[in-house]
Image (cartoon, coloured by chain):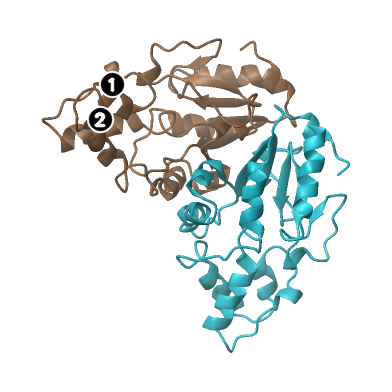
Chain colours: A cyan, B brown
Amino acid sequence: MNKRSAVSNASRNSLRVLLDLDQVLADFEGYFLELFRQKYPEHPFIPLEKRKGFHLTEQYKHLHPDAVEKTREIYHAEGFFYNLPEIPGACSAAKEMAAMDGVDVFICTSPMLTNEHCFVEKIRWVNDHLGPEWRGRTIITRDKTIANGHILIDDNLKILGACARPTWDHVVFRACHNRDAKLRGRSVLENWTDGSWRDLIEDYLKRI
Amino acid sequence: MNKRSAVSNASRNSLRVLLDLDQVLADFEGYFLELFRQKYPEHPFIPLEKRKGFHLTEQYKHLHPDAVEKTREIYHAEGFFYNLPEIPGACSAAKEMAAMDGVDVFICTSPMLTNEHCFVEKIRWVNDHLGPEWRGRTIITRDKTIANGHILIDDNLKILGACARPTWDHVVFRACHNRDAKLRGRSVLENWTDGSWRDLIEDYLKRI
């Protein structure tokens, strides 16, 4: 956390934290694998400890010729995004974070454009897991570089867009697919359960 | 356009323009009135030249005791947002703007949380009227203050949120309901057809 640029761009004395949804609050990878194995019990699969790279289908396509179609059947299905289980401790941490003095928390989520159900399902997920008032704190955008926050907690290592120098510091959330990733100076949040997210937030709060 | 603050916060040399959807690109007020008069031909209504204030139902509720329910029936209906007609010249202007060197254009739209259909309908509207690639340039957020652009073109006069000093300058888009509004130093764009939007964009381009 040596990068102070985001903090110096602060527009007021509230810390704005942007939380990615899939794989930070909602367990995309675990639920995908569960459904895939249920639906295709004979098909080869990639256990979570062997997942590599952000795009699941990119890895599955090397497994079997029909894997691309089968993976898409799972995550394009109606209800997939709505039914994602919570990452352990994520929602209670988000709620506790939002209740901290001087912290504004937003959900910042990229829609899957090939699954139109995801738009409303993401909002319903937020409603049910966090509460209706969180719908007003949810930003649905493919380009996260134009969200003006101080911290973006996201499992995706490559967050690119129109804004070459986003206002936020990217804190990498640990996921099966980024286990061996180069952090390139970024902080990492290993989970929501060991309490280290509080240290992260408190450290930023001291600096704005 | 004396406010240079947004421009000095530019993250790179591309001008990021945020376009509101309802009543800037899509004719919410006109379509609402058309449907209202079709569905309730005997009911009193407010002609567009007498509309005042951003929230339509706030004005209608003084007309008749059941007007609140009837207005909501119109804009909560499935298909309402998808079927909004285009504001004259809006989409060709948006496309021309996006094709200008050094300009990135985004749609920045606030969802109506009481109409869940609106999420996917807004995306489908963008897809059909602007093109599929514009879905990736669409930001759905109740809080527009945390969208990091240089200009926000929006008919709503009160755009408040977590960020007390947004990066953008608010350019007011003229609408029936803001005809007599105090601009408080803001620029105004009267329409998409007289070509003045080009002067606005070119003026900003000189300053970044």
Callout 1 secondary element: helix
Vertical relation: A88 (above or below) B144:
below
B24 to A129, vertically: above or below: above
Image quadrant of residue A183? Answer: bottom right
Percent across and percent down for residue A157 are 76, 55
- Quarter of the image with the N terminus of chain A in it: top right
Q: For the view shown, which residue lies furthest in the bottom direction?
A: A42
Q: Position of residue A188 (x, y in %)?
A: 81, 54
**Residue A147 found in image quarter:** top right
**Residue A28, percent across and down?**
61, 65
- Mark 1, residues whose alpha carbon is within 10 Å: few (<14), some, or many (≥20)? few
Camera-side residue: B163 or B110? B163
In which quadrant is the C terminus of chain A drawn? top right
Give the amino acid type for the residue marked by disc 2 in the picture. Leu
The amino acid on which the numbered mark 1 sits, given as a three-letter code, is Leu
Q: Residues within 10 Å of mark 2 (few under 14, many from 20)?
A: some
At 61% across and 49% down in the image, what residue appears?
Answer: A95
Q: Is residue B162 visible?
A: yes
Q: Which residue corresponds to the image point at 40% horizontal and 29% vertical from the top-left?
A: B23
Is B39 positioned to the left or the right of A21 in the image?
left
Cβ–Cβ under 8 Å for marks 1 and 2: yes
Q: Chain of mark 2?
A: B
Find numbered disc 2 in the image and state the secondary structure of the residue it sits on.
helix
| Observer-nearest of B190 and A145 | A145
Query: In percent of the image, x 55 and y 57: which residue is there?
Result: A112
Q: Which mark is residue B48?
A: 1
Q: Chain of mark 1?
A: B
Residue B117, image x, y percentages? 38, 49
CA separation in Å, label 1 and label 2? 8 Å
Residue at which label 2 appears: B33
- First of labels 1, 2 by sequence position: 2
B10 or A126: which is nearer to us? A126
